[in-house]
Image (spheres, grey):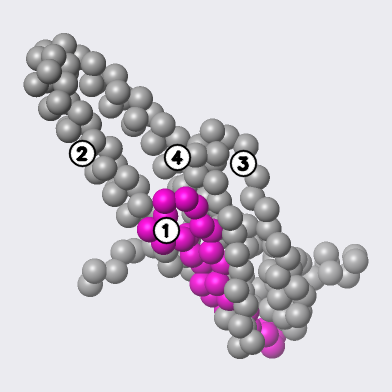
């Protein structure tokens, strides 16, 4: 009770043909996340990967103003049946609460500015504050969409990094 149900795309669970050492090497490479959209520039991300000797790993994406980073925690285990590596984990920290807090701050700021404008300018003050709210929500929406996309992309990134079929290994 109290646990939030995670969507299926928050999990990673596959067997790759890569051996355990190759998976570790791929995860150890530095990752530079591209900032293509305005939303991605409003929430610039950095990614760090921590690997432990027992096969546990944590991939974190940090961004300015974060209460906590976006975090995927999992394990790399040798798969006896295929000779490859079983990669399994889940996103344990997402941006859902971050968006709620930022949204509440925007409405609190809007309420305070509206009150000041109303005291000073009466009805004209309210007419001035409504476009301000729409502008703040528009900019925040770009940031929130970029954070949501970064959260959903973390599991996809893990698959792109590590999932290799047996045929792809033989070709190399």
Q: Nearer the viewer, mark 2 or mark 3?
A: 2
**In this picture, is 139 found above or below 100?**
above
How far separated are the C-alphas under marks 1 and 3? Answer: 19 Å
Whether residues under marks 4 and 1 lie with C-beta atoms below 8 angstroms apart, the answer is no
Mark 2, residue position: 108
Residue 35 tag number: 3
- Lateral position of residue 147 relative to residue 167, left or right: left
How far separated are the C-alphas under marks 1 and 2? Answer: 23 Å
In percent of the image, x 28 and y 37: which residue is there?
Answer: 106
Whether residues under marks 2 and 4 lie with C-beta atoms below 8 angstroms apart, the answer is no
Q: Residues within 10 Å of mark 3 (few under 14, many from 20)?
A: some
- Lateral position of residue 141 relative to residue 115, left or right: right
In percent of the image, x 32 and y 45: which residue is there?
Answer: 102
Residue 94 tag number: 1
Q: Residues within 10 Å of mark 2 (few under 14, many from 20)?
A: few
Q: SS at mark 2?
A: helix
Residue 165 tag number: none
How far separated are the C-alphas under marks 2 and 3? Answer: 30 Å
Outermost residue to the right: 172
- Label whose residue precedes the other's in the sequence (2 or 4): 2
In percent of the image, x 59 and y 59: which residue is there?
Answer: 47
Q: Position of residue 79 (x, y in %)?
A: 67, 84
Q: Nearer the viewer, mark 1 or mark 2?
A: 2
Q: Is residue 130 visible?
A: yes
Q: Which residues are magenta?
A: 57-81
Q: Main secondary structure of the magenta part?
A: strand
Q: Residues within 10 Å of mark 1 (few under 14, many from 20)?
A: many
Q: Residues within 10 Å of mark 4 (few under 14, many from 20)?
A: many
Mark 4, residue position: 143
């Amino acid at each position: 009770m109290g646990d939030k149900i995670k969507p299926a795309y928050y999990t990673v669970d596959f067997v790759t043909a890569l051996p355990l050492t190759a998976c570790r090497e791929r995860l150890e490479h530095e990752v530079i996340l591209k900032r293509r959209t305005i939303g991605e520039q409003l929430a610039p991300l950095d990614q760090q990967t921590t690997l432990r000797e027992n096969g546990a790993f944590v991939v974190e994406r940090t961004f300015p103003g974060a209460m906590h980073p976006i975090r995927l925690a999992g394990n790399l285990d040798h798969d006896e049946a295929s000779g490859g590596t079983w990669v399994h984990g889940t996103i344990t920290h997402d941006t859902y609460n971050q968006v709620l807090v930022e949204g509440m701050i925007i409405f609190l700021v809007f309420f305070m500015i509206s009150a000041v404008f109303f005291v000073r300018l009466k009805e004209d003050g309210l007419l001035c504050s409504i476009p301000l709210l729409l502008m703040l929500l528009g900019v925040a929406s770009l940031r929130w969409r970029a954070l949501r996309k970064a959260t959903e992309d973390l599991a996809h990134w893990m698959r792109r990094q590590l999932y290799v079929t047996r045929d792809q290994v033989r070709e190399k």
